[in-house]
Image (cartoon, rainbow, N blue to C red):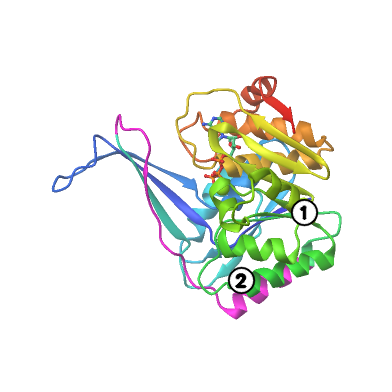
Amino acid sequence: MIYTITLNPTIDRLLYLEGELTKEKNNRLERVKYDLGGKGHHGSYAMSKLGVENQALGFCGTTNKRKLEKILEEKGINYDLVEVYGKPTRESYVILEKDVSGSTLITERGYAVSSYDKSLLFEKIEEKVEAKDMVLIAGSMPPGFEIEDLEKLIKLLNKIGCFVACDLSGEALKAAVKTGVNFIKPNRFEMLEIAEQGKSLLDTVKELTKTIDYVIVSQGGSGSLCGHKNEFYQITPPVVVVKNDTGAGDCFVGSFLASLTQQKTFVEALTMATACSASKVQHEDSTSFSVKDAQNLQKKVILEKL
Ligand code: ATP
Ligand code: MG
């Protein structure tokens, strides 16, 4: 079983404007769509879409609980969330202007979690997760969830003996590397934050693979630099028409981990994840991709052994 943990979930409210966003004008909406914003939820979506059993864990506010649950259900995601009483799950606003590429993102910080909320999450994890499982911790941490809490969470998972994957950044990523995990996938900017100054990206990956089973640095449209044991690869995706690259990394992580649990080799998991995320960037929202397109794109992924 794969569990994903989203500590700071978000409901994305996609605002499609009739025209360009203009000050001192009534900017009318053409339509509004809701989507998942949490990175762990995005990962769960990719796993479910590939037919791999998983469950989304983490927090959710009670005051708009049904709203989040409805989106999770519509997207076919199995979940078991810890309720943060009397608070709403944060909502983000994604402004999409007519005939303008890219989007404007406005996010809330999210509610603060209490010691009680955190203890409920730890209890749930202890109760559910077994040594044969895989756990993905992804996304930012809500106010009240400190680096020490993250370290405590990783230590608990290490004690259980499961595979621990992280999609974190900044201090949280540093703490995860220090505490000990099995998988990380920073993008190149997140990697620069933890890399030793002056060290090349490849040498940094080589160094990290001494303690981490799988180290992948994603580089947007240029692909990724990947290391596992003594195998290192530069992967290049096929050229595609990009509509929205938000969530490409989450799709990559979800499909890579899903492939690993399907007993695929490192190379097969890498090419599949690269193909799924290349399909994802051709979609408007942050999660959608086509498995059929991905299977075709996988044949066009370029793999260079380093
Ligand atoms: P996010 O956090 O928004 O999910 P990220 O910054 O973590 O994204 P990226 O490095 O942008 O992740 O992308 C992850 C992977 O998705 C890349 O390694 C690549 O395989 C694929 N990808 C991203 N952008 C493109 C693109 N323009 N064309 C094809 N593949 C892409
Ligand atoms: Mg990312």
- Disc 1 beta carbon < 8 A from ligand 2? no
Magenta residue span: 98-126
What element does badge 2 sit on?
helix
Quadrant occupied by the C terminus: top right
119 versus 166 height, above or below: below
31 versus 166 height, above or below: above
Across and down, in percent, residue 285 comes to: 47, 38
**Image-quarter location of ligand 1:** top right
- In the image shown, does 52 or 243 lie closer to the viewer? 243
Q: Earlier in the sequence, mark 2 or mark 1?
A: 2
The residue positioned 67% from the left and 35% from the top of the image is: 273
Q: Nearer the viewer, mark 2 or mark 1?
A: 1
Instruction: In the rendered structure, find residue 212 and report the number of the disc placed on it.
Output: 1
Looking at the rendering, which quadrant does residue 84 occupy?
Answer: bottom right
Q: How crowded is the residue under tag 1: few (<14 C-alpha within 10 Å), some, or many (20+)?
A: many
Q: Amino acid at mark 2?
A: Ile
- Please say whether residue 124 is one of the residues in the magenta stretch: yes
**Residue picked out by circle 2:** 147
Instruction: Answer whether residue 51 is visible to the viewer in this image.
Output: yes
Q: Residue furthest bottom?
A: 115
The answer to whether marks 2 and 1 mark residues whose Cβ atoms lie closer than 8 Å is no
